Amino acid sequence: LAQAILSQGAKLASFGAAAVPNSLSAMKQKKTVSSSRRKSRKAYFTAPSHLRRKLMSSPLSKDLRAKYGVRSIPIRRDDEVMIVRGHFHDREGKVIQVYRKKFRIHIERVTRDKANGQTVPVGIHPSKVMITKIRMDKDRKALLDRRGAKTKKGKYSEKDTGITT
C-alpha cells in the first residue's frame, strides 16, 4: 500500500500536480477525531460544564508530581495554588471559586479595585497556576490512585530487576 501511494505521488509530481505527502505518518490516526483548528476551538468554547471540569486542569508541583505520579488534575475549590504566570505571579492562595462558564478560577487575596471602590476577584486561567496542596476526598484519592497506577506499569529500571550492564 505504501509503495502504491509513493508511486502515485511520483506519477503526479511528474505531471506537475500538487505534491502528495510521502509518509504514512501524515495520515489521520482516528477517523472520528478532527484535527481542524476551527472544530477544536468550537468544541472547546461550547463544551458543557462536565467537560469543562476536565479542560480546567492544573499542573501539580514537583513534590506532588513525584508523590502521586500524576502531572495534572482538574482544579477544585479549596485547593491551594501558586500563580506562575502573569501580573500576579508568585502569589499563593486558596481557590475560592471555579468559574467554569468563563474558564477561570478565583483565588483568595487576588483582587482588583474598581473605580467605585469595590474590590472584585481577578479571574486566573487554571493552566497558569500550580497546585501546591490538594484538597483530598475519596473521589480525588481514587482518581490519583487510578492515574498514578498507569506510570507504574511497563518498563522496569535496573534497580527493580537487579541486572546491571
Image (spheres, helix red, strand yellow):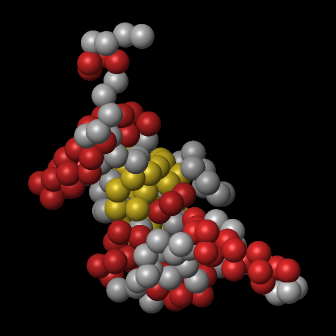
* Number of numbered discs: 0
Q: Quadrant of residue 65?
A: top left
Where's residue 138, x and y in %? 12, 54
Q: Residue at x 40, y 48 (%)?
A: 71
Q: Residue furthest left?
A: 138
Left-right relation of 58 to 159: right
Residue at 26% from the left image edge and 51% from the top image edge: 147
User: Toward the viewer: 42 or 104?
Assistant: 42
Residue 115 percent across, percent down from the top left:
65, 79
Residue drawn at x 55%, y 79% as measured from the top left: 35
Q: Is residue 76 visible?
A: yes
- From the viewer's side, name the closer residue of 57 and 37: 37
Q: Height in image: 17 above or below 95?
A: below
- Whether 152 is drawn above or below 23: the answer is above
Q: Is residue 136 visible?
A: no
Residue 117 image position (x, y, % from top left): 58, 75
Q: Is residue 14 left or right of residue 91?
A: right
Quarter-wise, where is residue 21 in the image?
bottom right
Residue 128 image offset from top left, x and y in percent: 54, 58
Q: Going 66% across and 57% down the picture, which residue do you hit? A: 87
Which quarter of the figure is the C terminus placed in? top left
User: In the drawing, does residue 134 fall left or right of residue 42?
Assistant: left
Considering only vertical position in the picture, is 80 above or below 65?
below
Residue 48 horizontal side relative to residue 106, left or right: left
